[in-house]
Amino acid sequence: MSNPSATELPIGRTYKEGFHDDIKTLKTVPKGLSHDVVDYMSDVKAEPDWMRQFRHRSLDLFLKQGIPEWMPGLRTEFNYDEFTYYLSPVDKSARKWEDVPEEIRRTYDKLGIAKEEQKLLGGLGAQIDSEMAYHNVQESLTKKGVVFLSCDDGMKEFPEIFREHFAKVIPPEDNKFAALNSAFWSGGSFVYVPKGVKCDVPLSVYFRINAEQFGQFERTLIIVEDDSFCHYVEGCSAPIYTTNSLHAAVVEIYVKERARCRYTTIQNWSTDVYNLVTKRALISSKGVMEWVDGNLGSKRTVKYPSCYMIGEGAHGEILSLASADKGMWQDAGAKLVFLAPNCTGRINSKSISGHGGRSSYRGLVQVAKNATGCRAQVNCDALILDERSRSDTYPTMETNGNLATLEHEASVSNVSEEQIFYLTSRGIKKEDAVSMIVNGFIEPIVKELPMEFAVEINRLINMQMEGSVG
Amino acid sequence: MSNPIAKSSVETLARNEPAWVANQRRVAWETFERLPLPSRRDVDWQRFDLKALQLDKLAASNSNPFVTASLSSLSSPLAAKGVLFSTLPAAITQHPELVREYLGKSIVADEPAKFAALHNALWDTGAFLYVPAGLRIEAPIEIEYRFQGDHAAGFPRTLIVLEAGAEATVVQKFVGGPAADVKLAAASVLAASSEVFVKDGGKLHYVISQNCGPNVFDFTLKRAHVARDAEIDWVVGMFGGSLSRYDVQCIMEGEGGMSYMYGVGVGDGQQQIGQFTKQHHRVGHTTSDLLFKNVLRDQAASNYAGIIKVEKNANGTNAYQSNRNLVLDKQVQCDTRPILEIESNQLRCTHGATVGWLDEQQLYYLRSRGLADVEAKNVLIEAFLEPVLARIQVESVQREFAELIHHKVVR
């Protein structure tokens, strides 16, 4: 059933991406996780044997691993057997927009994807459910040797590079959800930027879940070679159902010497989606990694983009923005792990909780033995909009036998009456005043986003603000 | 005759006690037996090395407790006004009804913590201070707990009650323990607790210093209940013991209540220092401020974890929490985990944590003014700790702290 009009939630957030389209399923599997599903996926994808073995091993690891105590609820809130682990409405990833099936194109038109490709982006990928429906990169970039493919195609077309780097940053042993992804991964991107190539325009991918009770497990592998630059942007959304969906992605990034990579996420899942993501970058000497992580949707997000600094003088930076509205728990944060001397890192987190939402910052700054002279700075600010909402800060800093300088600061506050009074006394409506204060609060992070995304964030935040002040 | 850490020792203690005390002990012992020994799998214990801890090698007491409490004498005018200050066992005998109203009401018999439960089951010495309403005591009241004996476990328990509008200064010291040069099969254990009740408008200044000898594992729980317009300021000094792990908690129960929590830890050798603080705002319009500073050298390790918890409808809370660590040597291990859990919105909560070493420029400045390298370092270290020391309102104790720090830091 197609329902293009915006879906209204009782209060607060208006989620215009909450529609659902009827899209014909070409390939799918029965609900639940099993080794048969793994075999089916490997068959359909005609994968090399090592990948099939890897998937089976990962599934075994998933079944064995527990969920840490600090992830309350995730043990009991859903049943893994209620999800479909593979579902594809497309045959292959198209390189031309015209080749994408019409009904999928219609979905993306409604979301406003693709319109922007020509003028703004160096490449665009569009994933629906398990598979990439579209993946294309500008010719000028291809000529420089930049590879931007779906992860499945990356494995086929660049088997050596792929195998050398795949699952080395985040092995399936890392955590339960990484193991789940490793067993059922499908879609996502493979990005390779050769030495010395600056990829000035962003590469963008949009993830859409359309099916109900579905598990999306995209996998992204980004390799930025020495002295290169790349900016990768992802967005996502899903329909509003009454049942849950699961999104467990794994993103692995290699930032080689003196290279720089920026990874921007605008996460806007519907409040049916459990978003349990592992993202990690390995940064070589003098490399720079920047995560810009915006979390505005989902029922529950558990995501801590991480920077592992393995070369001297590497720099890792995480800008995290979370907005928890009704029915959401944004358990977002960041990790800086210093494994080499003289590295620097910074975490800047801003969170907003309103309409009974809960946002938590959970962070780790860890300095290994022999990683001397490292410096890290962490700033967390939280804004609570009403008395039903909640905000937590759980930072950890660990140093092991070295001289590191670590700083952490956090504050939690409300939109004060004084601020509102000041603005209303200047003739600004109360609602606009709150919006203005909130937008000012998140501005340091929003200004780091590409223009179009900044506008989108402001729109989404303003929507969540509606009816915040009584 | 030495008593092991066992049910039989609980019964020996319970023999001459009122039933309600004996029952608390039995419940506590059951709790102790039920709880597993903390291990590195527990997030609050993962940085502590408990290998030297072997409870079965320790005695809970022999003919006397291993910890003796000596109390400063109470002037007769104060006693005449109704101030009670005695050992805890004496207080239970002389004022059973009054003590019963408070003892075990905050640190309950089934307190879900291994060493607190052990303490609750086997406490054998302690102090009781009761200040009646409206009475202000100028002179500091001193409690000294002296630890004696090897392979020993001591359990001093402190109960402080300040009635409405009362004010007092309490200085509590922990000293003694096995000598440094004795080779021991197992570390001795000191498991202490303090229960503090500050009623409406009361004011307690509470200074604690722990300077036990090495070979002591110190597990201490201190909890204060702060009522309407009441105030408590703590200064905790952690200097001795091979491992000392303090839980310091304040529970804000009345509007206008204030808690100022200050701490200093100085670790050298292979000392392990743990500071676990809690600022629990049950009601709104309450204030808490916390500053814990540590100086670490050699292979010392420190682990700070502090939580500010603001419950629903505790609007008007103002809470601050800060942990600063100064690392002097490369082998030091230093963790800090400041936590906020906030469920109200009309409030302001902030926290900060730092780990850093001495600033080269500041050292250079001091050296360029003719200070030797060592002197320059000492000046900076002492300046770093000064904000905590300045909070101690008893001059002689402040001097003592300064000397202890000087003694440990200056090389």
Image: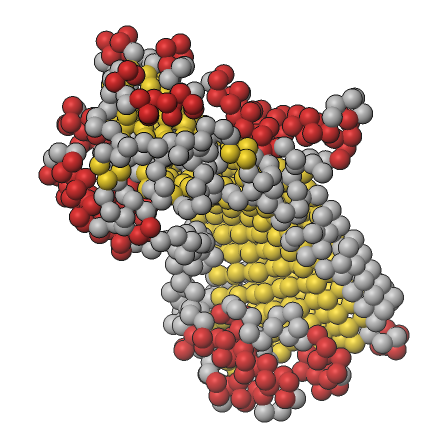
Inspect this view and state whether residue A319 appears.
Answer: no
Residue most toward the bottom?
B15
Here the colouring is secondary structure
Quadrant in the rendering for residue A125: top left
The residue shown at (46%, 33%) is A18
Q: Pinpoint residue A152: horizontal percent, then vertical percent.
A: 21, 30
Q: Quadrant of the C terminus of chain A?
A: top right
Q: Could you tell me which residue is drawn at 82 percent across and 60 percent down? A: B201
Q: Is residue B36 toward the left or the right of residue B290 in the image?
A: left
In the rendering, at what x and y percent does residue B380 appear? 60, 39
Residue at image x 77%, y 33%? A418
Any part of residue A96 in sight: yes
The residue located at (24%, 24%) in the rendering is A93
Where is residue B260 drawn, in percent x and y? 70, 52
Q: Is residue A7 left or right of residue A173?
A: right
Number of marks in picture: 0
Quadrant of the image occupied by residue A131: top left
A209 shown above or below A259: below
- Between residue A236 and residue A14, name the one nearer to us: A14
- Residue B174 horizontal/vertical position (percent): 61, 66
Instruction: Report the residue that reaches farthest toward the left.
Output: A49
A278, B134: nearer the viewer? A278
Quadrant of the rendering where the N terminus of chain A is positioned: top left
Q: Nearer the viewer, residue A76 or A160?
A: A76
Quarter of the rendering containing residue B136: bottom right
